[in-house]
Amino acid sequence: MPLVKMTELFAARENNSFAVGAFNVSNMEMAMGAIKAAEELNAPLILQIAEGRLKYSPLDLLGVVMIAAAKKCKMPTAVHLDHGSTLETIKLALSLGFTSVMFDGSKYPLEENIRRTREVVKIAHAQGAAVEAEIGRVGGAEGDYKAVDVLVTSVDEAKKFAEETGVDALAVAIGTAHGNYTVQPKLRIDRLKEIFDAVKTPLVLHGGTGLTEDDFKNCIAGGIKKINIATASYDNSARKIREVCAENPNAKFFDFSDAIVQGTFENVKKHMKIFGLENLLAQ
């Protein structure tokens, strides 16, 4: 299948029966596992890497792998830069062929976030790529970035931001956080629905790891069109590696490689089913 833009994977805004899963990968094996899940379930896929992880997986190396993997996948696949914080990284992703980029300007005051996001939109749209941005603040820490507290997105600010930037997808903060939860979050589904009613831009949920199946389904019904999953795939891959070590002290390199593929596959498949993606493209 050809690479597709992230926005091509979203159905009509009013169809709140599913959300597209966006899965962070950090090596070839994780990309292979995600693709295996998408092909088995006949589901669309977004492969992504966060700027905060690039010290482990340099973008000029991993990005090429992600693009090649997406082109090989039998299902429509977008390749996305998650939580881009610098123009340098965003421009590199676009030059590699990423079909969407996120500029995370949530640390800036609203007007500064709008100004910087508009600049990214201009650059990305000129190259045929889509742009995601964030308004409010999703808690926890993405990659090696410093942890921050949740700042729930304001309806009025979300509307102003979407209208003045022209972004293609908008990540909103409704109580989720990056990483593993120490206590179960209390999601502001009421606020999500208010934002959905006020904003025409497809909405994105970050901090999906650790949410319950009901949490995900309530978010999808409330208008979320894209859900990010990162930590859960890393954790399951690490768990699979530990199982290999425990079962076979003489395990070889390729045993661990297979474990990462399987760990990612299992996690992506599980979440795709929850997100309503199974056989979506076979209908």
Image (cartoon, rainbow, N blue to C red):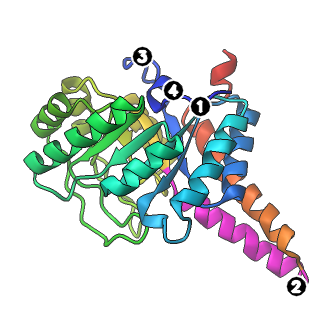
At x 40% / y 32%, what residue is drawn?
A: 127
| Side (left or right) of 210 relative to 266 | left
Along the line of sight, the residue nearer the viewer: 253 or 186: 253
Q: Which label's residue is closer to the chain start, 2 or 1? A: 1
Picture layout, residue 162 above or below residue 269 = above
Between tags 4 and 3, which lies in front?
4
Q: Which label's residue is closer to the chain start, 2 or 4? A: 4
| Side (left or right) of 130 relative to 276 | left
Q: Amino acid at mark 3?
A: Ala
Picture layout, residue 193 above or below residue 59 = above
Query: Which residue does the numbered mark 4 point to in the structure image?
Result: 9
Q: Amino acid at mark 4?
A: Leu
In magenta, the rendered stretch is 229-250
Counting from the top left corner in percent of width and height, residue 140 is at 34, 65
Question: How far apart in space, not on screen, are marks 2 and 4 (Cα)?
Answer: 43 Å
Query: Which residue does the numbered mark 2 point to in the structure image?
Result: 249
Mark 1 surroundings within 10 Å by alpha-carbon count, few (fewer than 14), some (14 through 19), many (20 or more) = many
